Amino acid sequence: MSDTFAARQAHVVGSAIAPMPAEAGIAFDEHRIAYVVERIAGKDVLDLGCVDHNADNAMSRHWLHKAIKARAGSLVGLDLSADGVARLNSSGYQVEHGDAQNFALGRQFDAIVAGDLIEHLEDFSGFFNSCKAHLRPGGKLLIATPNPWYWRNIVKAVLSPEVSNNPEHTCWFCPRTLRQLAARHGFVLSDIAFGSRYARDRLMPLPRGIKHTSWNGTLTLA
């Protein structure tokens, strides 16, 4: 792990964001979880931003890291929250304290997961270069990020000069902009899938690029 963090702690809201409701089990049918676990089964996995703001999310059935652990061959997490890392390690997880924009773990993985993370970052070169150094040949970087064209965002944009979002977010990504950014760092985007946890969205008769809250994609080295 690098001793120099790229992110400034003052910009991290972290555990001030309320955790998801505590529920037993794992929501393997939830779109983000289903997308990831299908592609990491039996593999050596690194999960970036695994605390997901609040370590109490470990009690939620929608916590991605728990689902990955249930399906991966091996799993290492990495997160900027020192408190969250300590709590997860005390619960039997293997998590490193570090910054997804600047890390060096001294090993490589079959897959790296960045679930709802890239929209928090400011140093994209550091992120992609760190991921590239930790991927084995043929490895995959799995991304999940909010959908900027989600229908509720469009409504908010019509009614207000700004669309409210997570106070840690620095940007929005659609498949086109992520594809163009990733290409600058030698990655190719494929396997795009939109999804929403909410039945109201899944049942709405709208195009996939508008009806869903978020989307997933797979990045591979060109």
Image: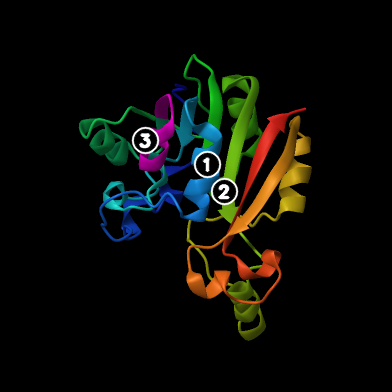
User: For the residues carrying marks 3 and 2, which lies nearer the camera in this image?
Assistant: 3
Asked where in the image residue 89 lies, by quadrant, the reply is top left
Q: Which quarter of the rendered picture does the N terminus lie within?
A: top left
Q: Picture coordinates of residue 127 (x, y %)?
A: 60, 34
Q: Nearer the viewer, residue 101 or 193?
A: 193
The circle on residue 36 is: 1
Residue 144 got which mark?
A: 2
Pick the residue in front: 119 or 32: 32
Can you give x and y, in whole percent of width and height, for residue 25 in the image? Answer: 29, 50
**Distance in Å between CA atoms under marks 3 and 1:** 12 Å
Mark 3, residues whose alpha carbon is within 10 Å: few (<14), some, or many (≥20)? some
Q: Position of residue 130 (x, y in %)?
A: 59, 26
Q: Amino acid at mark 1?
A: Val
Residue at left 64%, top 52%?
A: 193
- In percent of the image, x 50 and y 25: which residue is there? 43
Identify which residue, 64 or 14, lies in the foreground: 64
Is residue 69 located in the magenta-colored stretch of the structure?
yes
Whether 195 is drawn above or below 69: the answer is below
Q: Identify whether 163 is placed above or below 6.
A: below
The amino acid sitting under disc 2 is Ala
Helix, strand or loop for disc 2: strand
Residue drawn at (43%, 24%) of the image? 73
Counting residues from the start of the chain, the first of labels 3 and 2 encountered is: 3
Q: Secondary structure at mark 1?
A: helix
- Circles 1 and 2, Cβ within 8 Å, touching? The answer is yes
Q: Which residue matches tag 3?
A: 70
- Mark earlier in primary sequence (1, 2): 1
Asked whether, in this view, residue 82 is left or right of residue 196, the answer is left
- Horizontal arrangement in the rendering, residue 119 relative to residue 42 (left or right): right
Magenta stretch bounds? 66-76
